[in-house]
Image: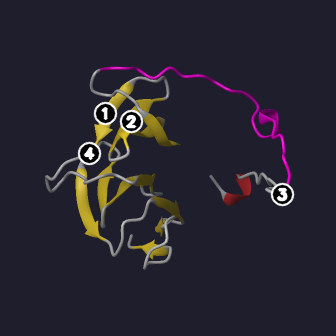
Amino acid sequence: MAESDLKTITISCEKDQILNLSEFADSIEIIPLETRDDNLIGWVQRIVSANDCYFLSSAVSHYTQELYVFGKDGRFIRQIGQEGEAPNAYLGMNDFVLTDDSIIKISENYNLACYDVNGNFLYKRKQKNCPLEIISFNNLIYGLNILPSSHDNQLLKR
């Protein structure tokens, strides 16, 4: 999607404002997600639509999050990575992004764990901090520290 395709929605924080969905969406489609014992969804932190799939991070507690992939029809496809201490696992996922080159990067404690869209582990990269939120812009990853810390918001390594 080109930057010119994005619509800016201005919201004033100084007054109560009603924002009608019809101002920025033509239609809504509800897609029931396949539910199985191995993909029970808790609190949804982020959903990304890409590659004809939905990538969804789900937290069953503050400390346990998992990343699932569903087809556009809601069919469960796979889990990306796994929480744990194995070299190809992640310890406490904070957030995830899907980069322009279709690499899934999971922010965890002082690492970025990287997977391809098929769920295959690629590598881990050490970081100076553990950002609570990450975003991808022009194929660069930015870590956002919401809480006060000794590290400012910063560009993470690719």
* Residue at the disc numbered 1: 78
Taking the magenta stretch, the answer to whether it contains residue 25 is yes
How many angstroms separate mark 4 from mark 2 (CA)? 11 Å
Secondary element at tag 3:
loop
Q: Residues within 10 Å of mark 4 (few under 14, many from 20)?
A: many
Across and down, in percent, residue 142 comes to: 48, 68
Q: Which comes before the other along the chain, label 4 or label 3?
A: 3
Tag 1: amino acid: Arg
Lateral position of residue 149 relative to residue 124, left or right? right
| 85 with respect to 126 (left or right) | left
Q: Amino acid at mark 2?
A: Val
Q: CA distance from mark 1 to mark 2?
A: 5 Å
Q: CA distance from mark 3 to mark 1?
A: 43 Å
Q: Report the disc number at residue 81.
A: 4
Residue 74 at x, y = what percent? 46, 24
The answer to whether mark 1 and mark 2 are in CB contact below 8 A is: yes
Q: Which amino acid type is shown beneath numbered disc 4?
A: Gly
Mark 3–mark 1 contact, CB under 8 Å? no
Task: Tell me if residue 54 can be seen.
Answer: no
Could you tell me if the residues under marks 1 and 4 are in contact, i.e. CB atoms within 8 Å? no
Q: Secondary structure at mark 2?
A: strand
Estimate the spatial distance between the alpha carbons at disc 3 and disc 2, rounded to whole Å: 38 Å
- Residue at the limit of the structure toward the front, as seen here: 148
- First reached walking from the N terminus: tag 3 or tag 2: 3
Considering only vertical position in the picture, is 28 above or below 7?
Answer: above
Q: Earlier in the sequence, mark 4 or mark 2?
A: 2
Q: Which residues are magenta?
A: 15-36
Name the residue nearer the viewer: 27 or 149.
149
Label 1 secondary element:
strand
Q: Which residue is mark 2?
A: 69
Query: In the rendered image, which quarter is residue 70 located in?
Result: top left
